[in-house]
């Protein structure tokens, strides 16, 4: 399976969107400073994920998520966490 996810850093007050085959390992990677885009914080929290059968589907969804504004991202997360 391939997962698209949204993580949030409270200290930076930003969302990051990505994809992975292993969300737990990827979150550890983000929080350990090994990713250039997320290395400025170590308080990343997983708020949303969606599974896909193929890498292609996941990449298409990741691209769609990256185009969303903050309000749309927060609405998506709110619906996911109900």
Image (cartoon, rainbow, N blue to C red):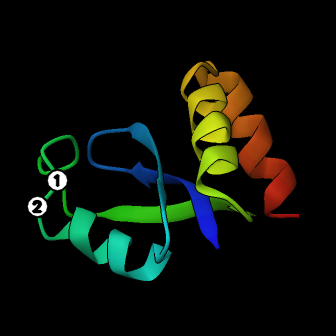
For the C terminus, the image quarter is bottom right
Q: What percent of the width, then of the height, locates residue 14? A: 39, 37
In the figure, 2 relative to 18: above or below?
below
- Image coordinates of residue 21 in percent, x first then y, are 49, 71
Q: Secondary structure at mark 1?
A: loop
Q: Which mark is residue 24?
A: none
Local packing at callout 2 (Cα closer than 10 Å; few below 14, some 14-19, many 20+) is some
Compared to residue 3, the image places residue 11 above or below, namely above
Q: Is 70 displayed left or right of 72 in the figure? A: left
Relative to residue 34, is residue 54 drawn left or right? right
**Figure disc tally:** 2
- In percent of width and height, residue 18 lies at 46, 48
Residue 31 location, quadrant: bottom left
Q: Secondary structure at mark 2?
A: loop
**Residue at image location 18% in from the left, 53% down from the top:** 41
C-alpha distance separating marks 1 and 2:
6 Å
Q: Nearer the viewer, residue 47 or 34?
A: 34
On residue 35, which mark appears?
A: 1
Closest to the observer, 9 or 20: 20
Q: Residues within 10 Å of mark 1 (few under 14, many from 20)?
A: few
Q: Nearer the viewer, mark 1 or mark 2?
A: 1
In which quadrant of the rendered view does residue 69 lie?
Answer: top right
Residue at (37, 50) in percent of width and height: 10
Q: Is residue 74 left or right of residue 75?
A: left
- Label drawn at residue 33: 2
Q: Is residue 71 left or right of residue 43?
A: right
Q: x and y percent of residue 30 in the render?
A: 25, 62
Please report the residue visible at 35 percent of the width from the left and 51 percent of the height from the top: 9
Please tell me which residue lies in front, 17 or 56. Answer: 56
Which quadrant: the N terminus? bottom right
| Tag 1 near tag 2, CB within 8 Å | yes
Nearer-the-camera pick, 8 or 58: 58
């Amino acid at each position: 399976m391939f997962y698209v996810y949204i993580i949030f850093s409270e200290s930076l007050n930003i969302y990051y969107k990505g994809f992975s085959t292993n969300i737990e390992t990827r979150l550890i990677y983000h929080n350990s400073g090994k990713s250039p885009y997320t290395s400025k914080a170590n308080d990343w929290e997983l708020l949303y994920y969606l599974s896909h059968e193929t890498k292609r589907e996941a990449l298409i969804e990741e691209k769609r998520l990256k185009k969303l504004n903050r309000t749309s991202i927060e609405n998506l997360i709110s619906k996911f966490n109900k």
